Image: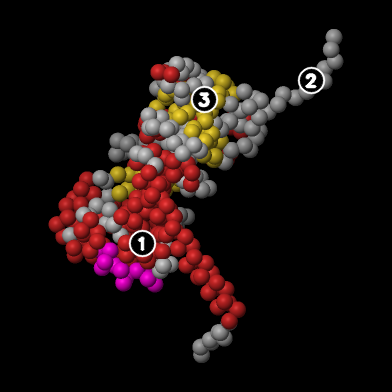
Amino acid sequence: MTTSLAFNPKAACFLDTAFAEEVSLRRTQGRQVRALARFAEAGGSRRSVTEEVALRFSVSRNQASLLLEISCALVSRLPNTLAALEDGDIDLYKASKVSQLTREVSDEVAAQVDAFMAGRLAKRDAGAIRKSVNGAVQKFDRAGYKERAEKKRARRHVSLEHDDETMSTLSGFLPSEVASSIYASMSRAARARRARDKSRTLDQHRADVFAERLLAEDGHGKPRAHIHVYVDFLTLAGAREDPATLAGYGPIPDWLVREIAADPGSTWSRLITDPATGQLLEAGAGTYRPPASLARLIKARDRECTHPGCHRPAEFSEIDHITTWARNGKTDHHNCHGACKTHNLLKEEPGWTAEPTGNGGMTITTPTGHTYHATPEPLHEPRPEPEDDTPPF
């Protein structure tokens, strides 16, 4: 026996309204794409344009770069795909499947792929569009496809992306056959463990095998990780439940930092903060390659690159002046900060200025006149001293 639901005109109206809004959003994206392409043409160097879009849109540098790349490609090389976006047939994400897979082909091949896809975009999901574009690129550029595949295999790498609730994604960009072999090997080991230990799922066993293999640096020794965690002593002692800070990630809960602290391999450095502000006053030497005192103070205070929106840990950043040495900038903790190499070079771009505001803070002005403020987060909430009720003598 089959049961059918009666037609619900009210529900259909809601869905139609939602889809009409979707079409409107797609057309708006088309106008945004044209505006961004014009800005990229008029706004200066690629580095300067990318960083200014990242600040204005409050997105990462990589997101800004990708958005600019897609916009410029749609306007200059993919008119049919852009027309589909402006007509509301596809959204920007689907349009990006065409631009990304044609980013390294010649203008001639891009035009062929764009024309081929003209009637193959509307009412199709992103995965189907990507497969069609991939097939078209191979069809119109067989030799180039092979050459690019060889170059891409040479660009294999590992990347880290932080998620919520104390989790992150570590991924490897690898040749397909290598990635498949690694996954199969981990799966075999996970299934063997699962047969002996039902307390963890197969996915949990697979993840644990993955972590153990990577952390055993010599292939068979005990895993050891070097990470930087900033925690209030009262939280560490269990008297408070304030979150700690994991460099490059952000806040982590008090229970997790106490678990990390319980590891017998952990080492500690003393940090002295101003109770009234939570800002760092002094960083004591640690036991693991202590740097010079000023650099140690700045890295502990900043924790990550001080450019707004950049979260590269300060341990992997450069210590440099906010007001440059050539402009009589002082070498002290007020005028020095941690910055990744990309954002440290940004001050050399025309129209970019940075002025210190004290304790690592600075005000950035972009070529279009917008200003942004960057200040290291305090290591804890301000704690005003309790009033002294002792009578004077």
In which quadrant is the C terminus drawn? top right
Camera-side residue of 340 and 98: 98
Disc 3 marks a residue whose amino acid type is Pro
Whichever of labels 1 and 3 marks the residue nearer the N terminus, that label is: 1
Marking on residue 388:
2
Disc 1 marks a residue whose amino acid type is Leu
The image quarter containing residue 127 is bottom left
Q: Is residue 187 left or right of residue 362?
A: left
Q: How many marks?
A: 3
Camera-side residue of 368 and 238: 368
Camera-side residue of 186 and 326: 326
Whichever of labels 2 and 3 marks the residue nearer the N terminus, that label is: 3
Disc 3 secondary structure class: strand
Image point (47%, 55%), residue name: 199
Tags 1 and 3 touching, CB below 8 Å: no
Whichever of labels 2 and 1 marks the residue nearer the N terminus, that label is: 1
Q: Position of residue 348 (x, y in %)?
A: 37, 29
Marking on residue 356:
3
Q: Which residue is mark 1?
A: 82
Residue furthest out toward the top: 393
Marking on residue 170:
none
Image point (35%, 39%), residue name: 45
Disc 1 secondary structure class: helix
Mark 2 or 1: the one toward you: 1
Q: Which region is colored magenta?
A: 113-126
